[in-house]
Image (tube, rainbow, N blue to C red):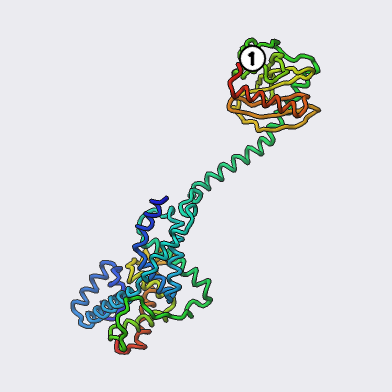
């Protein structure tokens, strides 16, 4: 290595970034070259002086307190928020995509169920064929239904005052076999359709279709559709009473 | 959450001096450096989950550096026309009318540093004071290795020239 080259490599040498071959060359040259050695010392001294000078800048005494105070002012939820984890967003996107897909594939699912339930109800009225098993006794109706379906519908004997059990039948709604329990209240016939919430959970809704009132809801046990020509308030009374009995276990 | 904050403080507070030093060199003024350090620590706290362990000092210094550059962009169109504030924080002894030769040289070096472009100051501090390797510098500053080396060379040359202007004896 020549003297001019030493000038070129001396800083990288002091940085510890020279490859071993060059490093050896440089050290061998310095062993023989006084001016090279004095350059090395000069550069080393300057570096030490540079570092010492810069290190004179120290954080002022109050800065630590200021920083601590500022950090403690940051509201807790901004600090270690669950919502800032990146995986949350990936999951959210997936969930939203699925929901969107379902919405597109099954728009207003309960509307379709309502429509078909209304058809079954009105056809039972027009043919006057309300039930396949006729009995006011739930003890008779339930096993009949259970035998023909692969689930056991909860059977409420007297869902509300003034209503009596007429019997039951099996219907098909949206390719599902459903249990239809029929009640009578004076002149009004009420069809209550139910099936297990395996494929979907019916949302709560109420609408009028073809002159009938149809309500949908679901719980852990069943999806329900209620069809009748009862008034609004009578429908609500029926649904409330029915739900109370289900919740309190007053059914078969 | 308390332990997370305590862990953060334990991990990152010890580097306050280094953080302040870098900020001070980049921004030249004590007040601005203090503001940037505070902002950087708050940012670091908010992003602490993303810190996967490793060199906490390098991590906070990078946040300080980025905060400083954002600050510079915001406050000054021409980054190098920043007034330089000489005061260094040391326990003040009695007022001396004349500084020692060493103190004078130190002051001259600080002034010479202040005249350098900010990228030169940055790379000199990170390389010589913080001891970062060329590779680490390249990665942190998003520069190719060759640029790191040439920038260091130019920075050191510039600094020597600036000092030579006031200290012709030194080379």
Report whether residue A81 is seen. Answer: yes
Q: Name the image quarter holding residue A119.
A: top right
> Residue sitting at 61 percent across and 15 percent down?
A146
- Crowdedness of circle 1 by 10 Å Cα count: few (<14), some, many (20+)? many
- State the residue position of label 1: A145
Q: Residue furthest front?
A: A161
Residue B64 in the image: state x and y as whole percent: 43, 66
Q: Name the image quarter holding residue A21.
A: bottom left
Q: Is residue A98 above or below residue A33?
A: above
> Residue sitting at 51 percent across and 46 percent down?
A88
Q: Is residue B165 above or below residue B33?
A: below
| Residue nearest the viewer, comparing B153 with B161 | B161
> Residue sitting at 46 percent across and 66 percent down?
B66
Report whether residue A5 is seen. Answer: no
| Residue nearest the viewer, comparing B16 with A47 | B16
Residue A24 in the image: state x and y as whole percent: 23, 70
> Residue sitting at 42 percent across and 50 percent down?
B1
Q: Name the image quarter holding residue B54.
A: bottom left
Q: Is residue A210 left or right of residue B83?
A: right
Q: Secondary structure at mark 1?
A: helix
| Residue nearest the viewer, comparing A69 with B3 | A69
């Amino acid at each position: 290595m020549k003297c001019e080259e030493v000038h070129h490599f001396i800083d990288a040498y002091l940085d510890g970034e020279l490859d071993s071959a060059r490093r050896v060359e440089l050290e061998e040259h310095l062993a023989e070259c006084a001016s090279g050695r004095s350059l090395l010392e000069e550069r080393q001294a300057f570096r030490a002086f540079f570092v010492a000078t810069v290190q004179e800048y120290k954080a002022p005494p109050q800065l630590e307190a200021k920083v601590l105070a500022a950090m403690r002012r940051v509201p807790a939820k901004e600090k270690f928020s669950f919502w800032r984890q990146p995986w949350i967003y990936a999951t959210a996107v997936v969930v939203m995509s699925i929901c969107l897909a379902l919405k597109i594939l099954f728009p207003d699912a309960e509307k379709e169920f309502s429509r078909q339930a209304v058809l079954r109800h009105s056809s039972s009225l027009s043919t006057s064929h309300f039930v396949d098993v006729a009995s006011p006794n739930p003890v008779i109706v339930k096993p009949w239904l259970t035998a023909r379906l692969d689930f056991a519908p909860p059977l409420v004997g007297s869902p509300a005052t003034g209503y009596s059990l007429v019997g039951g039948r099996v219907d098909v709604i949206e390719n599902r076999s459903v249990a239809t329990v029929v009640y009578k209240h004076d002149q009004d016939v009420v069809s209550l359709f139910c099936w297990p919430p395996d494929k979907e959970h019916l949302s709560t809704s109420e609408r009028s279709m073809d002159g009938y009132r149809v309500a949908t809801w679901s719980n852990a046990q069943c999806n329900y559709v209620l069809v009748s020509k009862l008034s609004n308030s009578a429908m609500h009374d029926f649904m409330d009473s029915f739900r109370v009995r289900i919740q309190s276990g007053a059914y078969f | 959450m308390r332990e997370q904050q305590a862990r953060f403080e334990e991990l990152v507070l010890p580097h306050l001096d280094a953080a302040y030093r870098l900020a001070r060199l980049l921004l030249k003024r004590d007040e601005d450096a203090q503001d940037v350090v505070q902002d950087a620590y708050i940012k670091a706290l908010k992003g602490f989950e993303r810190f996967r362990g490793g060199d906490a000092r390098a991590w906070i210094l990078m946040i300080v550096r980025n905060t400083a550059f954002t600050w510079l962009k915001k406050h000054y169109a021409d980054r190098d026309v920043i007034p330089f504030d000489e005061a260094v924080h040391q326990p003040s002894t009695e007022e001396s009318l004349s500084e020692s030769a060493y103190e004078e040289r130190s002051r001259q070096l600080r002034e010479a540093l202040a005249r350098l472009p900010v990228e030169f100051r940055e790379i000199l501090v990170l390389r010589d004071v913080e001891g970062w390797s060329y590779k680490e510098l390249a990665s942190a500053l998003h520069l190719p290795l060759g640029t790191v080396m040439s920038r260091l060379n130019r920075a050191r040359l510039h600094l020597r020239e600036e000092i030579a202007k006031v200290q012709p004896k030194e080379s």
